[in-house]
Image: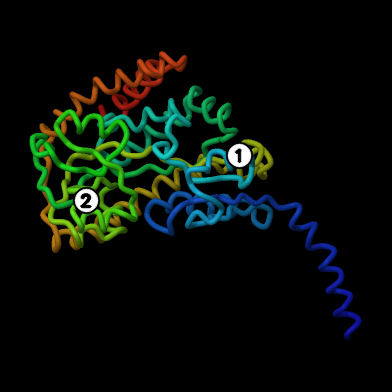
């Protein structure tokens, strides 16, 4: 009996490496833990692994376990790990054309419309080429965000109320708000609670509602807006091109289905987050409704920022006007 057991142990030792060598593993780096924002990639993982049982694994490494998030483009390009979460705003000038989707007030307020628009833009040849040539990356996972609102200790209902408010917001959104007298500053998400509590900032821009809830900012705030629905970070999951090409054929063919299911799962997760957090917010803060006419004032000014962005891209030899016009046409298609 002992000899039989030894035989099978040796046999397994010989076979096991072969099994491991035949399987495909993607390690994906993402910051933070499981939350509504990660529902999409968790859905894609389930779909991919079900299509290639035993021969494909997508390992989601939470909490920046594989390295600092600001180095994700370089790490995936070098295949230090196969895939990662990306948000364009974290990487100034690294995804210049894709930053079009971070232009203020360009995208509609409806979450499904936003998701559909982002998917079309991510498939545009200019964007595909930018990812591939600069970073050896292929987009595979949608990771859209709800519109940004503001929570804090200054009541904001009109654009006039922005004057003098120290706001956590960055990038081109900050450019627009400064035109109305806001004082933009950059505070990281983990620093937000203390910054609001100590008065270092007056208001914090974040995806509504789950962002505020996740970091408990309602505990140190008096007000939250509802209706600005600003563009925030443009986020997505990307994979090293060679890693994609080496994936099982079943996984590649399952990509459209996986993406569709990921979008549906994320929308559901954000809706569930709203149901959970809104009653809690009502107990702690005043929810200030922003009239569409006030948002329209910001959007009107934003048009000048859009055109300046396109001009800056064109001066650097990129098709800035072409991609902006494509996005504007895509927005129109999905909102009419």
- Percent x, y for residue 293? 10, 32
Cα distance, mark 2 to mark 1?
40 Å
Give whichever of 316, 293 is nearer the camera.
316
In x, y percent, where is residue 154?
12, 48
Apparent side of residue 229 relative to residue 247 in the rendered image (left or right): left
Which of the labelled discs sits on residue 200, or is there none? 2
Q: Quadrant of residue 15?
A: bottom right
The foreground one among 97 and 255 is 97
Estimate the x, y position of residue 226 in percent, counting from the top left: 17, 46
Q: Name the image colouring.
A: rainbow
For this view, does 81 lie left or right of residue 204? right
Q: Residue at x 52, y 43 (%)?
A: 71
Binning the other alpha carbons within 10 Å of mark 1 as few (below 14), some (14 to 19) or many (20 upward) gives many
Compare residues 195 and 78 and report the one nearer the observer.
195
Q: Which residue in the protein does label 1 denote?
A: 240
Please identify the quadrant where the N terminus is shown.
Answer: bottom right
Instruction: Identify the residue at horizontal 48%, vertical 29% (top origin).
Output: 123
What secondary structure is marked by label 1? strand
* Residue reaching furthest to the bottom: 1
């Amino acid at each position: 009996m002992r000899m039989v057991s030894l035989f099978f142990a040796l046999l397994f030792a010989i076979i096991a490496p072969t099994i491991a060598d035949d399987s495909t593993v993607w390690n994906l780096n993402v910051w933070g833990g499981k939350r509504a924002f990660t529902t999409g990639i968790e859905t894609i993982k389930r779909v991919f692994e079900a299509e290639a049982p035993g021969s494909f694994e997508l390992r989601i490494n939470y909490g920046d376990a594989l390295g600092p998030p600001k180095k994700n483009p370089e790490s995936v390009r070098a295949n230090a790990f196969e895939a990662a979460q990306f948000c364009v705003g974290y990487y100034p000038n690294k995804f210049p054309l894709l930053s079009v989707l971070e232009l203020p007030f360009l995208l509609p307020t409806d979450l499904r419309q936003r998701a559909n628009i982002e998917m079309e833009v991510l498939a545009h040849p200019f964007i595909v080429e930018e990812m591939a040539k600069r970073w050896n990356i292929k987009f595979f996972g949608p990771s859209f965000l709800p519109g940004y609102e503001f929570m804090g200790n200054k009541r904001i209902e009109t654009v006039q109320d922005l004057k003098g408010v120290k706001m956590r917001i960055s990038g081109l959104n900050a450019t627009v708000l400064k035109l109305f007298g806001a004082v933009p500053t950059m505070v990281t998400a983990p620093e937000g609670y203390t910054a609001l509590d100590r008065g270092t900032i007056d208001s914090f821009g974040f995806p509504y509602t789950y962002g505020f809830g996740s970091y408990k900012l309602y505990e140190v705030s008096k007000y939250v807006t509802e209706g600005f629905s600003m563009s925030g970070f443009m986020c997505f999951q990307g994979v090293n091109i060679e890693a994609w090409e080496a994936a099982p054929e079943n996984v590649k063919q399952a990509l459209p289905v996986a993406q569709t299911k990921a979008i549906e799962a994320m929308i559901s997760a954000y809706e569930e987050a709203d149901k959970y957090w809104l009653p809690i917010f009502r107990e702690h803060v005043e929810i200030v409704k922003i009239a569409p006419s006030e948002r329209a004032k910001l959007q009107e000014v934003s048009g000048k920022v859009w055109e300046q962005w396109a001009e800056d891209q064109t001066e650097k030899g990129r098709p800035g006007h072409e991609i902006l016009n494509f996005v504007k046409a895509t927005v129109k298609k999905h909102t009419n």
